Image (tube, rainbow, N blue to C red):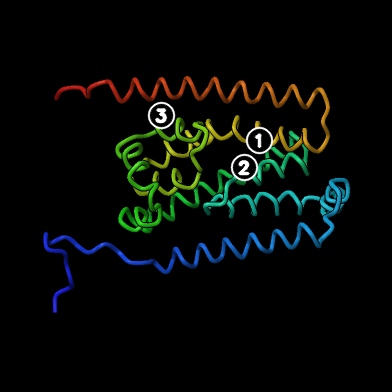
């Protein structure tokens, strides 16, 4: 028996998807847990957290970078980890660990996408898929760099999209490194300032965000020019 189709031959509208139900259920459960923790658990102070991290020595650095890499493989916003890095380690160490961790995670996601293939990644990206494909298909350094810098665009669709839609590993890694450093430093600086609001740290936050905004404008203009330039005739 052939599958049921509409009168025009198209496939029927899909019914409820189990993955959406499971994802929403997990989200609701996570929110309930967070609310319970907020009202019932007394969290340690920043000084205690920093003291505990310091007691771990080098292990805390490796652990944080590894955890950051894992987060970068998922849809969890990397902003959380960057701000936490500044809060716990300060601007310098937090920035180094954040950049190392996020680049390892981005690179891992890129290769996972290469192994999964374009069709699977498009399903994985969901609503992000067509937009990411339109921006990255046949593109390289400028596209990845611009998308990394533009506010509101998560890291994970760019990571998986770059691997699936033909961005070379060289362009992906180079653009990620160039665009990630100022963005991570700006977020780490915010975390550091929250932990200890001083004038010096406020200046670091301001300068880092000015750099991010300037780089975003330049990258976007360069990308637009490259997309408007017709390819050379054969």
Q: Earlier in the sequence, mark 1 or mark 2?
A: 2
Nearest the eye: 21 or 104: 21
Q: Do the residues labelled 1 and 2 touch (CB within 8 Å)?
A: yes
> In x, y percent, where is residue 126?
38, 53
Horizontal side, residue 230 vs residue 104: left or right:
left
Report which residue position mark 2 lands on: 79
Q: Earlier in the sequence, mark 3 or mark 2?
A: 2
Which residue is outermost to the left?
8
Report which residue position mark 3 lands on: 142
> In x, y percent, where is residue 132?
37, 42
> In x, y percent, where is residue 234?
14, 25
Report which residue position mark 1 lands on: 187
Q: In which quarter of the image is the N terminus?
A: bottom left
Q: Give the Cα distance between marks 3 and 2.
A: 22 Å
The residue positioned 36% from the left and 48% from the top of the image is: 129
Task: Please tell me whether mark 2 sits on a helix, a strand or a loop.
Answer: helix
The residue positioned 47% from the left and 51% from the top of the image is: 109
Q: Is residue 13 above or below residue 69?
A: below
Q: Are marks 3 and 1 in contact (CB under 8 Å)?
A: no
Q: Give the Cα distance between marks 1 and 2.
A: 7 Å
Nearest the eye: 29 or 91: 29
Residue 192 lies in what quarter of the image?
top right
Q: Which of marks 3 and 1 is nearer the N terminus?
A: 3
Which residue is outermost to the front?
7
């Amino acid at each position: 028996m052939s599958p049921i189709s509409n009168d025009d031959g198209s496939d029927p509208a899909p019914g409820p998807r189990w993955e959406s139900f499971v994802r929403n259920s997990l989200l609701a459960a996570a929110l309930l847990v967070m609310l319970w923790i907020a009202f019932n658990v007394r969290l340690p102070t920043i000084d205690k957290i920093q003291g505990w991290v310091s007691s771990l020595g080098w292990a805390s650095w490796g652990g944080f970078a590894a955890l950051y890499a894992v987060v970068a493989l998922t849809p969890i916003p990397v902003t959380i980890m960057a701000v936490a890095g500044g809060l716990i380690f300060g601007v310098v160490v937090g920035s180094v660990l954040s950049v190392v961790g996020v680049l390892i995670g981005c690179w891992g996601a890129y290769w996972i996408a290469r192994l999964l293939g374009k069709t699977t990644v498009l399903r994985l990206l969901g609503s992000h898929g067509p937009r990411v494909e339109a921006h990255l298909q046949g593109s390289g350094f400028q596209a990845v760099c611009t998308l990394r810098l533009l506010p509101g665009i998560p890291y994970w669709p760019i990571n998986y999209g770059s691997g699936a839609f033909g961005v070379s590993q060289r362009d992906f890694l180079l653009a990620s490194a160039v665009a990630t450093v100022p963005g991570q430093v700006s977020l780490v600086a915010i975390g550091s300032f929250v932990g200890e609001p001083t004038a010096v740290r406020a200046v670091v936050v301001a300068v880092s965000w000015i750099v991010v905004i300037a780089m975003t404008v330049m990258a976007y203009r360069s990308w637009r020019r490259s997309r408007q330039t017709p390819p050379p005739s054969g």
